[in-house]
Amino acid sequence: MAVSRSGVSKPRFVFVFVFLLLERRITVGAVTVNDIDGGRSGVCAMDLSSFLPFPYSNMSNMICKPIWNTFVLRYSQSDDHVMTIVLSALYTTGWVGIGFSKDGLMVGSSAMVGWVTKEGRARIRQYFLQGVTISEVIPYKGELPLTNIPATVVLHEATIYLVFQLKFSVRLTHQPVLLAYGTANPTHKHLTRHVDKTTIMFDFSAGSASVATEDIGRMKKNHGVLGIFGWGLILPAGAIIARYFKHRDPLWYYLHIVIQFTGFIIGLAGVVLGRALYGKIHANIPTHRGIGFFVLALSILQILAFFLRPKKEAKIRRYWNWYHHWLGRIALFFGALNIVLGIQIGGGNEWKIGYGFLLGILLIAIIILEVLLMMRRSNEKDQPPPAYPMNPI
């Protein structure tokens, strides 16, 4: 098998990011580790020294762990923090990658990616995952601390092996690991988009996965859904009712209260879930987190304002109205901004399209209702004042 090396760069990351691409005819979700070579014992009993090149063929005492579907991770750490990694999976065509990130997210990660071309040539490159689009996955870039031993890719029978060494400044322990696969070979050194992905928390000191594979991915999805549903739909709908339906008094008032309380509860659930997610992956996203807590504080102030709402005839009612209206508008603006930031950080094109469609519907509805409001106010001004009959003297 051919061997190809990637460039060496200084270590900054302490997080493992894994991408796996399998052949189109393999249904990854339908195959489990127990189906491979008779299960875990068969997978880890494979003698790698018979086909891996030197010096990887002389590696011993490697820890072996099936981690997701057909993916198996073998590794060893020396006393001077040199880690040898062997990642394997059932394979016919495609690419396989493993990388390190500082915060558990795809953006900002560095990855070693290997594949076998249609001509049977093995290739391995380092990539920097600058963003979520194909053009932002940059070849020959990254910050993985590769050693001088060349990395290699080996295709043995129906299994691909991606093998390389890294030297860290400290010993690796608990690391979030991202796994993904796609359906096509890289073209002109540019990776194709993955089809599916998942996340686990892997303990390199014990060789165990402490978090279920799909837990973190499901939490990210639910966090995004709650944020969009609460701050992107429910709360704007309540604000729309308060502005454009006051002629339906007192119906608009009760609808406004119910809808805004519902949106607050949903938004609060999204913040709580986001805090739990941060506790698992410790993502370095201070702007997104900061805006999230800021919006939560504004929403709490809005709830308190409801309980402190003065009567209509009170002198301070005018100032309360200014406070309530503008604080709500500021909260909705930053809520929408934070949704966009969250999608930019961890969402794909489907999230952008979905929220863009929702935002477009809201803007069209606001424009139509604003025009109707202006027409209604104009008609009210044009109407003559009511005539009162005069009593005869």
Image (tube, helix red, strand yellow):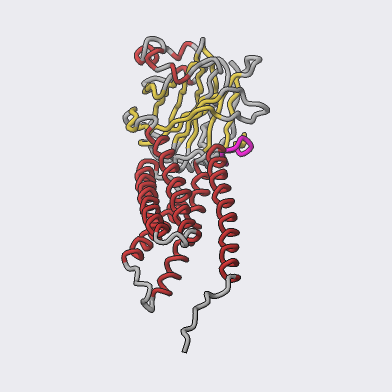
| Residue in the image at 47% along x and 53% along y | 236
Tell me residue 104's x, y (percent).
44, 40
Eyeballing the image, is 192 above or below 42?
Answer: below
User: Residue pushed farthest bottom?
Assistant: 393
Between residue 171 and residue 345, name the one nearer to us: 345
Query: Does residue 306 appear to the left or right of 187 in the view shown?
Result: left
User: Residue pushed farthest right?
Assistant: 188
Query: Does residue 159 appear to the left or right of 46 in the view shown?
Result: right
Tell me residue 264's x, y (percent).
38, 53
Magenta region, residue range = 130-136
Between residue 40 and residue 235, name the one nearer to us: 235
Residue 178 visible, this angle = yes
Eyeballing the image, is 342 above or below 27?
Answer: below
Between residue 383 and residue 215, name the one nearer to us: 383
Residue 140 visible, this angle = no
| Residue in the image at 42% along x and 21% along y | 69
* Magenta stretch contains residue 364: no
Q: Quadrant of residue 48?
A: top left
Tell me residue 339's x, y (percent).
49, 49
Q: Quadrant of residue 382?
A: bottom right
- Total numbered labels placed on residues in the image: 0
Tell me residue 144's x, y (percent).
52, 36
Quadrant containing the N terminus is top right
